[in-house]
Image (tube, helix red, strand yellow):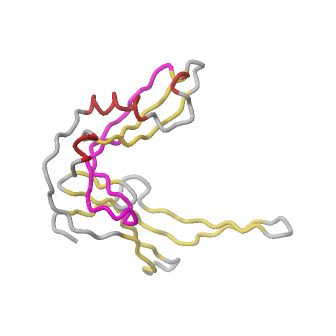
Amino acid sequence: MPMNVIIGLSSEDSIVNDMISIMYRNGTTRSYVNNVHVNYKLYYEGLELYGPGAKFRIYFDDKGNVIGFLGVFFRVKEYKELTILSPMDAVNKLYDVGFGRSMPINLVDRAVVKSIKLVYFVPSPSVNTTYIIPAYIIKGELIGKNGEKQEFIRLVWAVSIDELKHI
């Protein structure tokens, strides 16, 4: 792993118990822990790596023995400097890309942004790309004209699409 990539415990759901439930023909159900795994976050140059290619997970059996590992290793080097959009520009782009929820935009009375964080998006290794891309993770709440509320989490590119086309 490159020296400038740091591994840290995730503050959100760091230790996870994967449960399996089995329903028998007689109608009874039995649930048990299939495995326990610990999720770690990766950071590059102080920013969190986010997305399907930014995974680092260690699996344990019921005795605490390591039974598996899920992770993606890659080399990171600077390609070119890009202009990062302001957080406000990213919030304004939400109306262009949508909120990722089932509430139609014409029924939204207002959107409340609760947090915005600059990250590097890491695509899935199956995509066969070699770039990590600056993005904002925006969390908030949609409030409908009828008072209905829906939480949203949305990824918005932190660079212009025109700049991305030239990479």
Residue 8 in the image, given as x and y percentages of width and height: 29, 61
Which secondary structure class fits the magenta region best? strand
Task: Give the residue drawn at x 41%, y 40%.
Answer: 154
Residue range corresponding to the magenta coloring? 109-137
**Above or below, 23 relative to 143:** below
Please check the rendered image and state whether residue 28 is part of the magenta-colored stretch, yes or no. Answer: no
Drawn side of residue 39 relative to residue 162, left or right = right
The N terminus: image quadrant: bottom left
Residue 47 in the image, given as x and y percentages of width and height: 23, 51
Q: 33 or 74: which is nearer to us?
A: 74
Residue 56 in the image, given as x and y percentages of width and height: 36, 66
Residue 105 in the image, given as x and y percentages of width and height: 51, 26
Task: Give the residue drawn at x 19%, y 52%.
Answer: 46
Q: 101 or 24: which is nearer to us?
A: 101
**Above or below, 166 relative to 130:** above
Task: Give the residue drawn at x 37%, y 55%.
Answer: 51
Give the image quarter of residue 75: bottom left
Drawn side of residue 94 relative to residue 149, left or right = left
Judged from this view, the residue extending furthest toward the right is: 26
